[in-house]
Image (cartoon, grey):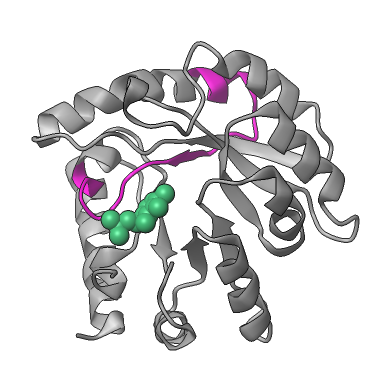
Amino acid sequence: MSIAVNLEQVRKQVDDLILQNNRESNSVRLLAVSKTKPIENIMAAYDAGQRQFGENYVQEVVDKCLALSDLNDIEWHFIGSIQSNKTRLVAQNVDWVHTLDREKIAVRLNEQRPENLPPLKVCIQVNISGELTKSGISLSDLPKLVEFVTALPHLELRGLMAIPAPQSSIQSQVEAYQPLLLAYNDLKMRYPNIDTLSIGMSGDMAAAIHSGSTMVRIGTAIFGSRQ
Ligand SMILES: *Cc1c(COP(=O)(O)O)cnc(C)c1O
């Protein structure tokens, strides 16, 4: 199994879905989720032109950043849940955080973002599956957190992220995304920097691109299954 071949297939799937849904070309970015995978796999994807990588574990992303620091055009995206005692390492090492869901973490990331780096790009994680998952803020609490985050100078709010509960059909996946898309469009009208709707994984890419995704987070389809 070749990572370069997988990447090419995923890029083609993304392009086909963009066409099928009458979306603008290049309107969906591909985040390669490399969690638990070795450095060599990231290098293989890099050599095939991939620059944006997603990681879930703080120590792992720190180690990988360090090991690959020569490749300074890699963009690191943190997509795991953040404990408050790990915020400094996140603020110091990554370019993006997709999983911001509370004020306390926002305050810490803002304070701990080094002055010599650009503001940390963030997406607020929304819980669109009710009680099924713990992470993410509810849509009703979203406006308050948006207001809070946009006032912090070392954070740059770029959009919303969600991990929906598994659904049995594309139709029900699309339905689950609808309230999120409405909230995203509303946010976009009010804040000009908003350009990122981070939805879509290996199992629901079609529904996510149909539902307005601008960044799909793909692990398994690129790097193979994880243990
Ligand atoms: C692991 C993970 C992904 C990638 O999932 P695949 O099913 O392997 O594509 C995407 N987003 C998040 C938040 C993840 O934790």
Please tell me which residue lies in front, 88 or 73.
Answer: 88
Left or right of residue 93, residue 97 in this image: left
Task: Please state, as top left, top right, bottom left or bottom right, where the C terminus lies in the image.
Answer: bottom left
Please tell me which residue lies in front, 164 or 49.
Answer: 164
**Residue at image point 21% right, 70% down:** 9
Considering every residue shown, the one lying at the far front of the view is 85
**Residue at image point 56% right, 14% down:** 141
With respect to residue 8, does 15 lie above or below?
Answer: above
Tell me, yes or no, whether the highlighted magenta stretch contains residue 190: yes
Tell me, yes or no, whether the highlighted magenta stretch contains residue 2: no
Task: Please state, as top left, top right, bottom left or bottom right, where the N terminus lies in the image.
Answer: bottom left
**Residue at image point 33% right, 63% down:** 219
Quadrant of the picture in which ligand 1 is shown: bottom left
Please tell me which residue lies in front, 184 or 221.
Answer: 221
Residue 71 visible somewhere in the drawing: yes
Left or right of residue 163, residue 53 in this image: right
Q: Which residues are magenta?
A: 186-206
Image quadrant in which you'd find residue 35: bottom left
Considering every residue shown, the one lying at the far top of the view is 140
**Residue at image point 24% right, 69% down:** 225
Please tell me which residue lies in front, 98 or 208.
Answer: 98
**Place of residue 168 in the rendered image (x, y in percent of width and height, measured from the top left):** 9, 35
**Place of residue 209 in the rendered image (x, y in percent of width and height, measured from the top left):** 28, 42
The total of numbered circles placed on residues is 0
Left or right of residue 209, residue 99 in this image: right
**Place of residue 124 in the rendered image (x, y in percent of width and height, measured from the top left):** 56, 33
